[in-house]
Image (cartoon, grey):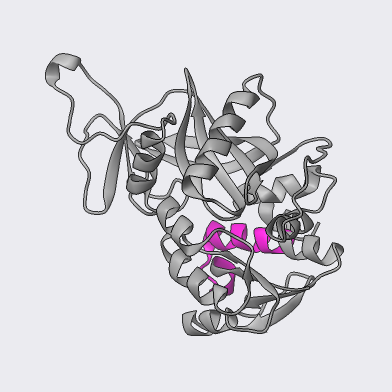
Amino acid sequence: MKILIAEYASALGLGGTCELEGRAMLATLARSFERAGNEVVYPTPGPGIEAGRPIIVKDVSEFEGALESKADAGLLIAPDGMQPRLLEMLEKNMLNLGSSPDAASLAADKLLCTRALAQAGLAVAEIVEKPDSVEMGCHRYVVKPRTGCGSEGVRITSFARAGPGEIVTRYCEGLHLSASFIAGESSILPLTINRQLIDFEGDGMSYQGSQVPYGTPRADELWAQAKAAAEVLSLSGYAGIDFVLGERPWIVDVNARPTTSIIGIARVMKEEIGELILNAKLGRPAKSVTIMGSCTFRKEDLGHLLIM
């Protein structure tokens, strides 16, 4: 099959670690789809990834034009707030290997997503509508953009005040983990549980990399939550859910698209990630995967990983 991989940050040359992460995910997926016998095309401003065939684009309009190129199937990786509209464009021209526009829209809206999961009885970081009373003592809160990627714009504070376009949740104490999986029509294929390497500085926090996989005796709890969340949100294809594992496995974010952890997963999994994604969409989901060894990477390593 001819597969289009449309990765926004690298195609638009956004710079910084955002572009580096995007290019590393693009390279990982392109190589995997090719090893599985597929033809790969991808939009780029010029620099190649030594896999697939580039479609040269200069701006956003040309990136969107690439979504109308002739391909059998396509996989989009873009900022959460942009995913729904771009997915609608992609679906008009090819098989969408990811979540539907509606599912991506719900997952991208942290307020609506958290409410949907809470109504389904899942453990989430509680949304704080107003500050706690003085009698309850001092509390810690997480203020974050209602729509945003990763830890960008996230701050930890004792003041439950949200600015325009932000939400406030109660701070959850615990281990920062993520669960990566491939969602099919009626089931999910667990890939790995990963430890997120988070730097805390001042009132901010930033994602710096991942340990893939991360062994925990509470894996069954995490996978049960991930499966239930995928069903509630109607996720499809590769997705990742961020947890804080404390007294309970609290869901703190949902990514209805490939995440940076896929870079490590492709290096420790015997099966081809591209083939697994494609087969799940075609109704031929795998039952399990084989994980061999481990991979720990930080953002500063990604330039090296690109040439591996």
Outermost residue toward the left in this view = 134
Q: Position of residue 81 (x, y in %)?
A: 41, 61
Of the pair 78 and 140, the residue shown nearer to us: 78
Q: Is residue 197 left or right of residue 301?
A: left
Q: Position of residue 120 (x, y in %)?
A: 41, 35
**Quick check: is 19 in the magenta stretch?**
yes
- Residue drawn at (33%, 50%) of the image: 146
Q: Is any part of residue 174 visible from this angle?
A: yes
**Quick check: is 201 in the magenta stretch?**
no
Instruction: Specify the quadrant that holds the C terminus.
Output: bottom right
Q: Is residue 25 left or right of residue 68?
A: right
Relative to 35, say whether 265 is above or below: above
- Residue drawn at (80%, 42%) of the image: 268
Q: Position of residue 204 (x, y in %)?
A: 38, 39
- Residue drawn at (85%, 62%) of the image: 36
Q: Is any part of residue 197 visible from this angle?
A: no
Of the pair 34 and 237, the residue shown nearer to us: 237
Q: Position of residue 55 (x, y in %)?
A: 66, 82
Of the pair 52 and 119, the residue shown nearer to us: 119
Quadrant assignment, res 77: bottom right
Relative to 287, say whether 83 is above or below: below
- Prevailing SS of the magenta stretch: helix
Quadrant assignment, res 305: bottom right
Which span is picked out in magenta? 9-28
